[in-house]
Amino acid sequence: DGGITQSPKYLFRKEGQNVTLSCEQNLNHDAMYWYRQDPGQGLRLIYYSQIVNDFQKGDIAEGYSVSREKKESFPLTVTSAQKNPTAFYLCASSSRQGEYGYTFGSGTRLTVV
Amino acid sequence: QQQVKQSPQSLIVQKGGISIINCAYENTAFDYFPWYQQFPGKGPALLIAIRPDVSEKKEGRFTISFNKSAKQFSLHIMDSQPGDSATYFCAAPPGVSSGSARQLTFGSGTQLTVLP
């Protein structure tokens, strides 16, 4: 079945540590996105990528980095510069055609310990 | 940059009742306006989407009403069921001038509880 796989489901980060969240899709979608979800604040865009080897900052990119070396993969690194990283992180992809907008992964819950 | 305001933040409805969630957006846009449903610990799933040149779209118990002149759209859930209890997000595509393709801006979400 086509879809988006995010891993791990739960991740714990120590202070000052960088961590990387994985996102893989087999939908042949060109565009991929990372959103952060906090209670009561909806989804906020961190980074997005329209094609391989190209990505753009979203509304809250500070403290995060991404890469897009393959069409299927869009990993997100939460760096030590991100002061409040505890959140639910969602990866999504989209096609340029049709009404279906985004397909989301099942998310990664990151907690600072 | 697109802006979206969603209300109410939370909603409690009796089984069989009608749930109504409202959204307002700022910048004119020409791509689809989707609604997503999210259960705890899961990613959002597309529920229904509407083109801005259509005033209403119905799929089963779910209806989107779209008012382009007022820049408002709403989700109506008819005959609400306990299984509909979830968080609902509206989203708007970029305005004409953004140059971005399908970079959605989401509302803050509505937590719906349907009582049995």
Image (cartoon, coloured by chain):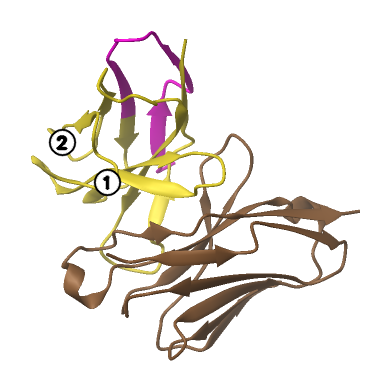
Question: Per the image, is B108 magenta?
Answer: no
Q: Quadrant of residue B99?
A: bottom left
Q: Is residue A28 visible?
A: no
Mark 1 or mark 2, which has the lower sequence index? 1
Q: Secondary structure at mark 2?
A: loop
Check the picture and name the quadrant holding the N terminus of chain A: top left
Q: Is residue A73 above or below residue B59?
A: above
Residue B102 x/y as whole percent:
29, 62
The image quarter in which residue B14 lies: bottom right
- Position of residue B88 measured from the top left corner of the image (x, y, whole percent): 60, 56
**Is B105 rendered above or below residue A88?**
below
Q: Colour of chain A?
A: yellow
What residue is disc 1 on?
A32
The reply to whether callout 1 and callout 2 are in contact (CB within 8 Å) is yes
Tell me where the magenta segment starts and ends, as one range. A1-22
- Neighbor class of circle 1 (other Cα within 10 Å; few <14, some 14-19, many 20+) is many
Number of the label disc, if any, that sits on residue A12 = none
Chain identity for the colour brown used in the image: B
- Residue A37 position within the rendered picture, expressed as x and y whole percent measured from the top left: 46, 40
Q: Residue at x 32, y 32 (%)?
A: A23
Q: Is residue A5 above or below residue B2?
A: above
Residue A85 visible in rendering: yes
Q: Is residue B68 left or right of residue B84?
A: left
Number of residues whose C-alpha sits closer than 10 Å to that of mark 2, classed few (under 14), some (14–19) or many (20 or more): some
Residue type of the residue flagged with mark 1: Met
Magenta stretch: residue A9 in it? yes
In the rendered image, residue A43, in percent from the top left (x then y), is placed at: 44, 48
Q: Residue at horizontal 64%, vertical 57%?
A: B9
Indicate left or right for A52 with B114 as reference.
left
- Which residue: 26% across, 50% down? A29
Q: Amino acid at mark 2?
A: Arg
Q: Which residue is mark 2?
A: A68
